Image (spheres, rainbow, N blue to C red):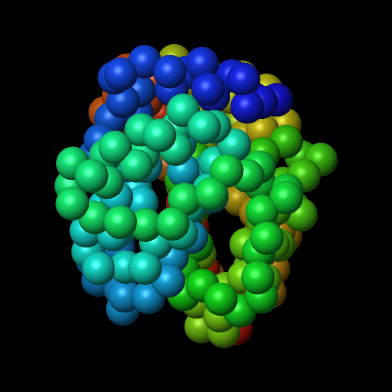
Amino acid sequence: MYNKDFWNERYANEEYVYGKEPNEFLRSRLPNLKKGRILFPCEGEGRNAVFAAGLGWDVFAFDQSESGRQKAIQLAKEKNVTFHYEISDALNYPYAPDQMDMVALIYCHFNKSIRTTVHRNCVRTLKPGGILLLEAFSPEQLKYTSGGPKDPDMLYQLKDLRMDFSEMNVELEESLETELNESPFHRGKASIVRLVLRKI
């Protein structure tokens, strides 16, 4: 499992290892939604949080990596936006009930032992009617070299995600092969899953 030291080392260089541009799925969906409070778990260097803040969302983010947070704050200064960014791991973040209008899980991969708990915490912090957006690698990603965990227990199948988010309404659900071009760590053919869910 990836720990704080792994991510601090990955984010230590000046270069933004996943780039400064937002995830394409997020970019395509977020401008069409009513602005509110949005949470980005495991946000790393801040590319998605900065994008949302630029659209006028009230952005909350967290990551266990101090070096990721530093780079996120620097990117926010470059783009002249502000957001709230805390140091926390996904299990211990204080998911206050009914606080967020949206949660965006962009390549937030958790081991089976904690995945369901974290996902249900994300649902809990959504307001009724709130949206959860997810993009992540599927088990078929193991045959590709375009990124993601090499541990099958950290890759996501739609059937497991349906169980984690069983109390939400499905607005979009897809499993597909795509071409990633987000950075050297996310580049090439990839097998991913996507969800857009709404809290009842």
30 relative to 62 in the view: left or right: left
Q: Quadrant of the C terminus?
A: bottom right
**Residue 45 sits in quarter:** top left
In the rendering, at what x and y percent does residue 139 appear?
A: 60, 31
Q: Is residue 163 something that shows in the picture?
A: yes
Which residue sits furthest left?
79
Quarter that holds the N terminus: top right
The image quadrant of residue 187 is: top left
Establish if 176 lies above or below 39: above
Closer to the camera in the image, 26 or 157: 26
Between residues 40 and 195, which one lies in front from this camera angle?
40
What's the residue at 56%, 76% (across, down)? 99
Report the number of discs: 0
Is residue 39 or residue 79 the one in the foreground? Answer: 79
Residue at image position (66%, 33%) is 154
Q: Residue 25 in the image: state x and y as whole percent.
A: 32, 50
Asked whether the viewer can see residue 196, the reply is no
Q: Residue at x 49, y 40 (%)?
A: 107
